[in-house]
Image (spheres, rainbow, N blue to C red):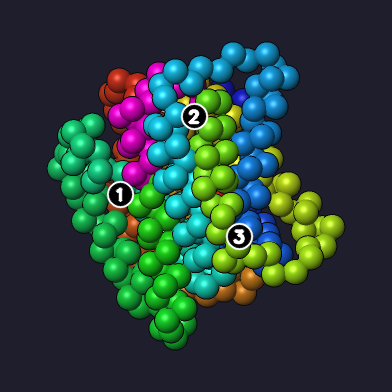
């Protein structure tokens, strides 16, 4: 990779890895619904303003229903699940379960006929599934209803991200990254907006909380997606999506070092199994070049 590609790769890994810590602060201040809604709307508006500032022509001829579906899954459902789960199961477990997105993506891609599963991919799926069972089934904390619902929400989040990515691959191949990402954030934010009537912002946030919100929305959501898609164009989709492994590693370190979270030894084996399964599924450094394809959307953490 060129030096700028390495810099972009490192930027994505560090930014998305640290985003779990910022997400916790935003959820604490704005509530898990407010965090999703405000983050999504600010990120979507930021991308459209950036497109206008650069005089980028946007094309939504694919139809609003397709963009709305991606917004409902990769933004609304994914972020609702992630924002609900992270305070309940910790950043380390949430980050590891987010790394399972490629596993769900391969299953859906196989069912929809978007890709053909290989022996290597099947081995990755089985290894990753075993890792999820170990990670969730042998926690280092007491198994409480909050923990169980948190794990379920995190897995639902990963499944929603995989569903939206495959849907976009199937119906929005011609859409540009600005159109796809900006519309998804705006639709996702508008869809979760009514939920604020049920789960309102708990109290008036502090000025620093608004700073965290802007950082999460503008830098860790909108800007990272621009960098991500540029990196895809430079080094390819498969090698770029492998950044999820580095994201998970950094997020786990943040959870253990800065937040005092812990994983049992057996959970460590589960985490290794999930990441190993994803490596088999993604095959980030194949020996032979493969045909370019629309990349799976990275985690919106």
Q: Is residue 121 visible?
A: yes
Read off the magenta span.
Answer: 162-177
Q: Earlier in the sequence, mark 3 or mark 1?
A: 1
For marks 1 and 2, give the CA distance. Answer: 21 Å
Residue tagged 2: 180
Crowding at label 2, few (<14), some or many (≥20) Cα neighbours within 10 Å? many
* Foreground: disc 2 or disc 3: 3
What is the number of the mark on residue 150? none
Q: Where is residue 250 in the image (x, y as percent from the top left)?
A: 56, 55
As helix, strand or loop, the secondary structure at mark 3 comes to: helix
Membership of 169 in magenta stretch:
yes
Residue found at the far right of this picture: 207
- Res 105 quadrant in image: top left
Residue at which label 3 appears: 196
Residue pictured at 64% horizontal, 27% vertical: 48
| Rendered residue at 43%/62% (across/down) | 154
Secondary structure category for the residue under label 2: helix
Distance in Å between CA atoms under marks 2 and 3: 25 Å
Neighbourhood count class around disc 3 (C-alpha, 10 Å): few under 14, some 14–19, many 20 upward: some
Image coordinates for residue 85, horizontal then vertical, percent = 49, 66
Instruction: Answer with left or right where residue 108 lies relative to residue 43.
Output: left
| Residue that carries the numbered disc 1 in the rendered image | 104
Percent x, y of residue 207: 84, 57
Label 1 element class: helix
Closer to the N terminus: mark 2 or mark 3? 2
**Closer to the eye: label 1 or 2:** 2
Most foreground residue, 290 or 225: 225
Q: Residue at x 23, y 46 (%)?
A: 107
């Amino acid at each position: 990779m060129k030096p700028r590609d390495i810099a972009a790769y490192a930027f994505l890994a560090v930014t998305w890895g640290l985003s779990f810590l910022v997400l916790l602060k935003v959820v604490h201040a704005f509530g898990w619904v407010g965090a999703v809604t405000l983050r999504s709307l600010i990120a979507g508006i930021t991308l459209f303003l950036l497109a206008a500032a650069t005089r980028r022509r946007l094309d939504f001829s694919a139809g609003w229903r397709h963009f709305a579906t991606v917004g409902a899954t990769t933004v609304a459902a994914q972020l609702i699940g992630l924002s609900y789960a992270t305070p309940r199961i910790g950043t380390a477990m949430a980050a590891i379960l987010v790394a399972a997105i490629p596993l769900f993506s391969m299953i859906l891609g196989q069912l929809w006929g978007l890709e053909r599963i290989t022996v290597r991919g099947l081995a990755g799926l089985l290894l990753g599934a075993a890792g999820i069972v170990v990670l969730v089934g042998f926690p280092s904390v007491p198994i409480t209803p909050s923990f169980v619902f948190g794990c379920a929400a995190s897995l639902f989040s990963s499944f929603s991200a995989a569903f939206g990515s495959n849907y976009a691959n199937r119906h929005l191949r011609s859409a540009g990254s600005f159109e796809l990402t900006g519309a998804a954030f705006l639709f996702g934010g508008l869809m979760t907006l009514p939920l604020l009537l049920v789960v309102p912002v708990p109290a008036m946030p502090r000025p620093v909380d608004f700073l965290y919100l802007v950082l999460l929305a503008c830098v860790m959501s909108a800007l990272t997606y621009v960098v991500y898609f540029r990196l895809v164009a430079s080094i390819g989709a498969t090698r770029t999506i492998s950044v999820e492994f580095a994201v998970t590693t950094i997020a786990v370190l943040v959870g253990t070092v800065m937040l005092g979270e812990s994983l049992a030894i057996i959970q460590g084996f589960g985490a290794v199994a999930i990441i190993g399964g994803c490596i088999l599924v993604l095959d980030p450094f194949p020996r032979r070049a493969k045909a370019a394809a629309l990349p799976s959307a990275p985690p919106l953490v």
